[in-house]
Amino acid sequence: MAKIDTTKAAAKAVAEKLARGKQNSASSTNSTSATTATVPIDSRIPGLLTITPDLVPGMMPSFQPNQYHISDPLNPPETLPQATQSQFDKGIKIYEGATRSLKLTGAALDLTREKFTVIGKHSKAFGARVRASQSGLTQGLRRM
């Protein structure tokens, strides 16, 4: 049975949708530009991402705590960053979807780790069987 991989197509569709949304909301006054960091792949171990402390700030969303300064809680400044209810709802849906995606990816990685653990145990058991057969310890097992 062939496995149909639609992950790339789905990711491309979502990226295009988000790009269209960003073009439509480019006039928003409260939008901040986030820099994206490219995480290099370790050349010694193909597929392994290299994350160093100097890359972490580029992976974080931008945040300016000074924009949220409130000196009088009963009279909050009107300059506090705002989001409309529709912006909030849309953003929450995107973040919740992304969180679900990351959790699924994490579960897949956990499963893969367990698979490699079992493969390792299988290899060790096979190796033990080979060593036992070479040393003649299987003579008694063959009679069973």
Image: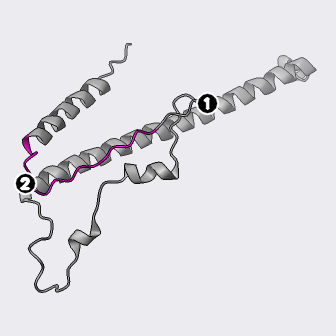
The range drawn in magenta is 24-39
Q: Report the residue that reaches farthest toward the right.
A: 136
Residue 17 percent across, percent down from the top left:
15, 34
Q: Amino acid at mark 1?
A: Arg
Q: How is the rendered protein coloured?
A: one colour
Left or right placement of residue 48 versus residue 33 in this view: right
Q: Report the residue that reaches farthest toward the top.
A: 1
Instruction: Identify whether 19 is placed above or below 26.
Output: above
Quadrant of the frame with the C terminus: top right
Residue 12 percent across, percent down from the top left:
24, 28
Left or right placement of residue 119 versus residue 140 in this view: left
Query: Which residue is identified by label 2?
Result: 86
Quadrant of the frame with the N terminus: top left
Q: Amino acid at mark 2?
A: Ser
Foreground residue among 21 and 4: 21
Left or right placement of residue 8 versus residue 106 in this view: left
* Front disc: 2 or 1: 1
Query: Which residue is identified by label 1?
Result: 44
Give the spatial CA distance, label 2 vs label 1: 47 Å
Q: Secondary structure at mark 2?
A: helix
Residue drawn at point x = 92 percent, y = 21 percent:
135
Left or right placement of residue 137 versus residue 113 in this view: right
Q: Is residue 45 magenta?
A: no
Residue drawn at point x = 81 percent, y = 20 percent:
130
Counting other residues with Cα less than 10 Å from the Cα at mark 1, is it few (<14), some (14-19), or many (20 or more)?
Answer: few
Q: Secondary structure at mark 1?
A: loop
Counting other residues with Cα less than 10 Å from the Cα at mark 2, is it few (<14), some (14-19), or many (20 or more)?
Answer: few
